[in-house]
Image (cartoon, grey):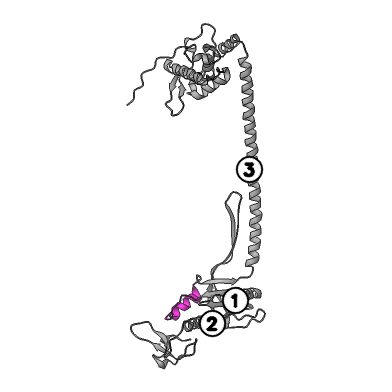
């Protein structure tokens, strides 16, 4: 194979087409890049393919080396969590392989195949196939695999008819982007082993995931059971409490608040809705103070009206179809405590909430007005 620069101009070049055998003319003008052209007949696409293919083979045979792409295998499996568990191994990095010598179209009788080029280094060989239009098909690939020898394919497609030898040389010898391994010893067995390893690790990850889910399920079930049991115990305690005589309930409130004399006026407020609660006002109001305010000011505890309403209804009971009225009675009482200085409106959205600012049974100290800038 010769380049236009290596021969005389015109018919004096004495060249023929490697594709069809026709006489070629070396065109070495000043306006276009130097190239060969058919003297009489117009060359076909197959002539271009044959010429580039022959040039590529000759370049490799002369150079006796080429850069090969990386060989890597990977395996993955989707986990029960939806994530992917993956691993990869590099069998061979991007590298230059140099031959002691190389041969073209060597017949490999064991597989009934003839590679374009075979490179030799000691007792080792590498098979190189090159294509312009048609890549190695499945049948030939199987034959190459059967040999158990590294086999590489070089893609020459896209090279134009006027491509210079240096471009072809770069494609064949240096570029790895146009090369693919048809067979690499140990690649498939490594892939199988890696997949087995990934599957085993994924099984263990899934097992731990299932165990964690089961533990969470049991903990949640136990939590729900504890909540149900606690609610039942509270309901039973409230039932027993409602069955106590009024005098005993008053005694318990006095004990909780430390009241020995007169009942505090602010724990016996009346409203038209108060009778909807099935207990005298001074008892449920004293109980609310003991449960939600007493000893809470130092910690600046917040009191939500909805929580107090629900507690009063469960603790003391409300008249039939009177739950709404009972809620109004409780909220009025909390508003009154806010006015007296025991609570302070927290200003939260949704249900009304208050902060405990004074929790003793004496009148709260007068506070300075709150100014808003």
Report the residue at 64% width, 21% height from top: 236
Location of residue 8 by image quarter: bottom left
| Secondary element type, mark 2 | helix
* Residue 330 painted magenta: no
Q: Disc 3 marks which residue?
A: 213
Chain-order first, disc 2 or disc 1? 2
What numbered label is drawn on residue 126?
1
Q: Which residues are magenta?
A: 156-175
Question: Badge 1 local density, few (<14 within 10 Å), some, or many (20+)?
Answer: some
Q: Disc 2 marks which residue?
A: 61
| Secondary element type, mark 3 | helix
What numbered label is drawn on residue 139?
none
Q: In this orientation, which residue lies closer to the viewer: 279 or 262?
A: 279
Q: Nearer the viewer, mark 1 or mark 3?
A: 3
Residue 176 place in picture, x, y as percent: 51, 71
Can you say whether 75 is above or below 214 in the image? below
Cα distance between the residues tagged 1 and 3: 53 Å
């Amino acid at each position: 194979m010769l380049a236009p620069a290596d021969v005389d101009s015109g018919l004096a070049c004495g060249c023929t087409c490697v594709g069809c055998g026709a006489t070629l003319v070396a065109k070495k003008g000043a306006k276009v890049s130097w190239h060969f052209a058919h003297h009489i007949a117009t060359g076909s696409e197959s002539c271009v393919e044959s010429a580039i293919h022959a040039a590529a083979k000759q370049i490799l045979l002369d150079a006796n080396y080429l850069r090969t792409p990386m060989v890597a295998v990977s395996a993955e499996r989707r986990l029960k969590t939806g994530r992917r568990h993956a691993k990869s191994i590099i069998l061979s990095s991007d590298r230059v392989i140099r031959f002691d010598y190389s041969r073209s179209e060597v017949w490999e009788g064991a597989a009934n195949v003839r590679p374009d080029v075979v490179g030799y280094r000691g007792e080792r060989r590498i098979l190189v196939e090159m294509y312009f239009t048609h890549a190695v098909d499945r049948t030939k690939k199987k034959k190459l695999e059967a040999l158990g020898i590294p086999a590489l394919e070089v893609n020459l497609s896209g090279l134009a008819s006027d491509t210079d030898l240096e471009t072809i040389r770069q494609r064949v010898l240096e570029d790895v982007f146009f090369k693919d391994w048809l067979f690499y010893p140990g690649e498939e067995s490594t892939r199988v082993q890696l997949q087995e390893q990934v599957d085993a690790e994924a099984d263990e990850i899934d097992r731990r995931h299932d165990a964690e889910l089961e533990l969470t399920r049991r903990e949640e079930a136990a939590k729900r059971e504890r909540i149900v049991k606690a609610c039942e115990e509270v309901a039973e305690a409230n039932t027993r409490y409602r069955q106590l005589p009024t005098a005993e309930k008053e005694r318990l409130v006095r004990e909780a608040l430390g009241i020995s004399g007169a009942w505090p006026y602010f724990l016996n407020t009346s409203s038209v809705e108060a009778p909807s609660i099935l207990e005298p006002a001074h008892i449920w109001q004293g109980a609310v103070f003991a449960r939600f305010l007493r000893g809470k000011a130092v910690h600046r505890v917040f009191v939500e009206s909805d929580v107090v309403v629900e507690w009063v209804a469960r603790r003391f009971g409300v008249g039939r179809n009177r739950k709404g009225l009972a809620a109004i009675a409780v909220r009025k009482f909390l508003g009154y405590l806010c006015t007296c200085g025991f609570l302070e409106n927290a200003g939260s959205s949704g249900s009304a909430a208050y902060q405990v600012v004074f929790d003793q049974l004496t009148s709260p100290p007068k506070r300075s007005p709150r100014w808003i800038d």
